[in-house]
Image: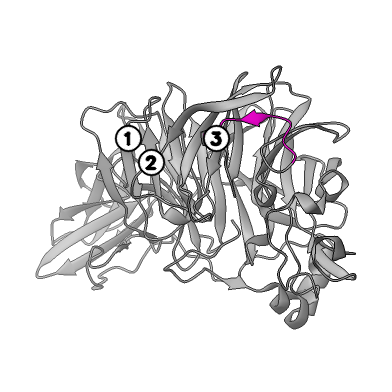
Amino acid sequence: MNAADPGSTPPRRVSRRDLLVGAGSLVIGAAAGFSARPIQTAISDAVAPSNDSSSDPATDSTRRYVSSQATISSFRIQKTAGATLGAGLLFAGVAMDVHRGVAFDDDGEPVWIDTTGADIYNLRVQQYRGEPVLTYTSGLLIDGYGIATGTILDSQYQVVATVRAANGLSADLHEFLLTDRGTAIITAYPTVTADLSSVGGPKRGHYIDGHLQEIDVATGELLLDWRASDHIALSESYQSIGSGGRTAADPWDPFHLNAAAVDIDDNRLLISARHTHALYAIDRSSGVVQWRLNGKKSDFTLTDDAVFAWQHHVTRQSATTITVFDNHVKSSSGTSRGLALAVDESARTVRVAQAYTHADRRAIAMGNTQHLDGGNVLVGWGTGKALTEFAADGTTLLDVRFEGSSYRSFRAPWVGTPASPPAIATRRANGQVTAYVSWNGSTETARWRFEYGDSAAALTASQTVARTGFETSASIPSSASSVRAVAVGADGTDLTSSVTVSA
């Protein structure tokens, strides 16, 4: 992250000074492993009042619904005719009052909207114990990093586990990666005191160290605690110290670890450090750095067009290809791009395999590059407020513009069957009754059957309509006094029903 979203109000952002000076109890809690979350009342998906006369949901850029209090900003979609897109839904944490988690389809129609009221980052589908799960980080954003926890949800959107940092640290928002070992890889940003005179700072200075921890999800056991300052010299940083580092409330940030990935060799991890413009391959057990790629002490020779800067995200696409998101626009001569690098570890050379760019997309911070099954590549533009899906050759297939930034954006297959029942509400106006229903997170509902009658015990008539998006509505006879909605699957099976409400 590292930068506020230009042109929008940052969500629930506080300064480090605010935390250290104005919230002593919070700092004490963080030191003990407590992860603060923004204080906000959770949005209820309970049954909305009948006969609601509120304004039409489409009167502004925020999507609002009658049956649910969930809200999300509208998306602007451009699709190439005939394009073959990747499988599954799109996932983002779009900045509104908070970064609100949303899963949506290729037409921009929401399927699931987070209703906790927390700032959601890193929303994506991962695997835990052989099952697909939905994961994210949430917490408090502090000058480009955060105090956070990692959350794992099952297909019913129930919490499977909450992951926190160990060794008295508080987890950061940047990374929450689940591995095949049943572990989570997270980042942490403690402030430490050191002599910074060698880099133009005070002799008794303060800087933000970077920790990469691997945590056993089930037990909370710490398996690895990799500390950047043990392996990376402060002089490798491109981040100017300026007046920073003079107080603990205004520390210098020389490393800014923001991403990790398990390498082809399961015993090796890849790490991205934004402020050194470098990727690091480390031994998963010992933490020893095996090589640096890019930056001031690169072990590789890069072609001029392969040099990246201020990057986010790192993934291993194949034995010879590594992807990053190259922010680079922070440098006046740079651009922003998803970048696939052809890496020859034997010859220690790097060249561009493919660059993914969009003339209207620039990102000072945030962003990611995701290689999809089938060969397409999805680029999340971070503060560029968009995601773009490309063909393997760089041709734009889909472009989605957001109202606010999204730290990362992803695509993945996902099947959701919410544990909570569908929400239903009615409106009566001008002698007409309209029933509205939504089932936040359901991917399997194909149709809705509205059952109605003279009383809750006598729902003697019904009509079935196709699901039309997050919320579906139908007109029912004005003589009906009670109604409920039944979710119907593509095979005609009844999935569940709402409660019965007055019409």
Task: Tell me residue 287's x, y (percent).
Answer: 85, 36
Q: Which-is-in-front pick, marks 2 and 3?
A: 3
Report the Cα–Cα distance between label 2 and label 1: 7 Å
In magenta segment, residue 32: no
Q: Label 3 amino acid?
A: Asp
Quarter of the rendering occupied by the C terminus? bottom left
Q: Which-is-in-front pick, marks 1 and 3?
A: 3
* 466 horizontally vs 237: left or right: left
Mark 2 residue crowding within 10 angstroms, few (<14) / some (14–19) / many (20+): many
Q: Can residue 106 be seen in this view?
A: yes
Residue 242, above or below 323: below
Q: Residue 304 carries which label?
A: 3
Task: Tell me residue 450's x, y (percent).
Answer: 25, 48
Residue 286, above or below 187: above
Q: Residue 396 carries which label?
A: 1
Report the Cα–Cα distance between label 1 and label 3: 25 Å
Q: Are marks 2 and 1 in contact (CB under 8 Å)?
A: yes
Residue 338, above or below 56: above
Q: Residue 388 carries which label?
A: 2
Query: Which residue corresponds to the image point at 32% horizontal and 38% vertical from the top-left?
Result: 398
Q: Which one is nearer the viewer's eye here, 487 or 238?
A: 238
Task: Tell me residue 432's x, y (percent).
Answer: 12, 64
Q: Label 2 amino acid?
A: Thr
Boundaries of the magenta span:
297-304
Q: Label 1 amino acid?
A: Thr
Query: Which residue corresponds to the image point at 81% horizontal and 46% vertical from the top-left?
Result: 232
